[in-house]
Image (cartoon, helix red, strand yellow):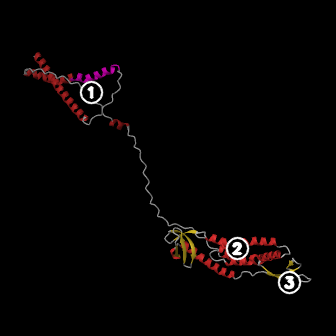
């Protein structure tokens, strides 16, 4: 059973792959398995295509180089200790057996009629040869796994052999001899291997550091959108279209009477009156619009109908209004001149009558 256990455990372990990430001197990453190490190089198997290749330590990252250098030192120390310990494997234990009766035996020599039966060695079920072969299979590749399997098996075998011992039969004496050899010889020998393992613990591989990427340029912050400020009410009023003023009713032209010839003396007397009369007669005309305004204000206010929506003022409207204003001003000037001429004629007529 023990032989089958050890023979099956090693191939199962060998099928497992230990994939690791490696970094070269340029910061590039590679996933591969370390299958062999040399003083200045390592042999890797790439995971992507399972290709086997060799890479020098100088082509790897500084941390990878330090890790592999320390690992190489531990491996060399372990290799030397492994070769030395294999030569120290304990010899088989041998003891004489004495017959007491037909089917009873003992390791103690009897005082009366001692009869040597035979010398018994640790050979039950190839017990000794099995452990010798398992230690011989230890190498640099399976050192930790194989040593762990041996250490796991020793206490189980020791317990089993102790349970079989404790009688006077040959099977009981063999089990007692096997247990004694395991306890006194094999366990101390196994502890030497454990000590070598602790002294040559392989360093832990550092975590890969990816190649530093350039920092992105800071992007300019977007300017906050400024909301349009509300314009004052005056500008809004100025923007509104101007209301058209109602057209002024046309004034009737005043018929001028034909001028009569007057004597020179009457003309001279009427000259000072010309200056006063137009001024006196022009005053009531200035007051007329005021009276009209008072009359309008005295009238009761009529309910104004809702204003109709004004049509958009065309661009030519201001020019038309300016022309209307100019025409109105000309008409007023002409009316004033006609009234002045009329007043002058009436004054001449009165002067002639007085004369």
Please report contact status of discs 1 and 2: CB closer than 8 Å, yes or no. no
How far apart are the two marked residues, 3 and 2, measured between alpha carbons?
33 Å
- For marks 3 and 2, the one nearer the N-term is 2
Give the image location of residue 185, x and y in percent.
76, 78
User: Quadrant where the C terminus lies?
Assistant: top left
Q: Which residues are magenta?
A: 282-300
Residue 263, image quadrant: top left
Q: Nearer the viewer, residue 134 or 342?
A: 134
User: Quadrant where the N terminus lies?
Assistant: bottom right
Residue 252, image quadrant: top left
In the image, residue 128 lies in the stretch drawn in magenta? no
Q: Residues within 10 Å of mark 3 (few under 14, many from 20)?
A: some
Q: Nearer the viewer, residue 339 or 270?
A: 339
Task: Please tell me which residue is depicted at 11% across the width and 16% down the height of the picture.
Answer: 353
Q: Nearer the viewer, residue 113 or 309?
A: 113
How far apart are the two marked residues, 1 and 2, measured between alpha carbons?
127 Å
| Residue receiving disc 1 | 246
Residue 40, image quadrant: bottom right
Q: Residues within 10 Å of mark 1 (few under 14, many from 20)?
A: few
Q: Residues within 10 Å of mark 2 (few under 14, many from 20)?
A: few
Side of 1 relative to 57 (left or right)? right
Q: Is disc 3 placed on a helix, strand or loop?
A: strand
- For marks 1 and 2, the one nearer the N-term is 2
Q: Is disc 2 placed on a helix, strand or loop?
A: helix
Give the image location of residue 190, x and y in percent.
72, 76
In the image, residue 287 lies in the stretch drawn in magenta? yes
């Amino acid at each position: 059973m023990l032989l089958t256990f050890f023979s099956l455990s090693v191939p199962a372990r060998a099928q497992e792959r230990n994939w690791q990430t490696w970094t070269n001197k340029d910061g590039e990453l590679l996933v591969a398995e370390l299958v062999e190490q040399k003083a200045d190089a390592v042999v890797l198997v790439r995971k992507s295509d399972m290709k086997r290749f060799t890479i020098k330590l100088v082509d790897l990252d500084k941390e990878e180089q330090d890790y592999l250098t320390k690992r190489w030192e531990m491996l060399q120390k372990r290799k030397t200790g492994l070769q030395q310990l294999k030569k120290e494997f304990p010899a088989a234990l041998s003891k004489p057996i004495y017959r007491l009766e037909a089917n009873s035996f003992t390791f103690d020599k009897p005082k009366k009629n001692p009869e040597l039966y035979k010398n018994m060695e640790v050979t039950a079920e190839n017990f000794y040869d099995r452990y010798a072969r398992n230690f011989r299979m230890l190498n640099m590749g399976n050192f930790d796994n194989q040593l762990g399997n041996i250490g796991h098996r020793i206490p189980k075998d020791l317990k089993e052999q102790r349970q079989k011992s404790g009688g006077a039969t040959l099977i009981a004496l063999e089990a007692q001899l096997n247990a004694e050899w395991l306890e006194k010889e094999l366990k101390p020998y196994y502890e030497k291997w454990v000590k070598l393992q602790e002294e040559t613990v392989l360093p832990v591989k550092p975590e890969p550091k990816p190649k530093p990427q350039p920092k992105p340029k800071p992007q300019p912050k977007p300017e906050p959108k400024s909301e349009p400020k509300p314009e004052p009410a005056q500008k809004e009023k100025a923007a509104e279209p101007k209301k058209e003023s109602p057209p002024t009713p046309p004034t009737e032209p005043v018929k001028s009477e034909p001028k009569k010839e007057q004597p020179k003396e009457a003309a001279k007397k009427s000259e000072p009156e010309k200056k006063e009369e137009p001024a006196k007669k022009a005053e009531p005309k200035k007051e007329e619009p005021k009276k009209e305004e008072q009359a309008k204000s005295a009238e009761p206010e009529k309910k104004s109908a809702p204003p109709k929506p004004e049509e958009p003022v065309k661009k030519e409207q201001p020019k038309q209004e300016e022309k209307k204003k100019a025409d109105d001003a000309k008409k007023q000037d002409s009316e004033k001149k006609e009234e002045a001429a009329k007043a002058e004629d009436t004054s001449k007529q009165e002067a002639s009558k007085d004369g």
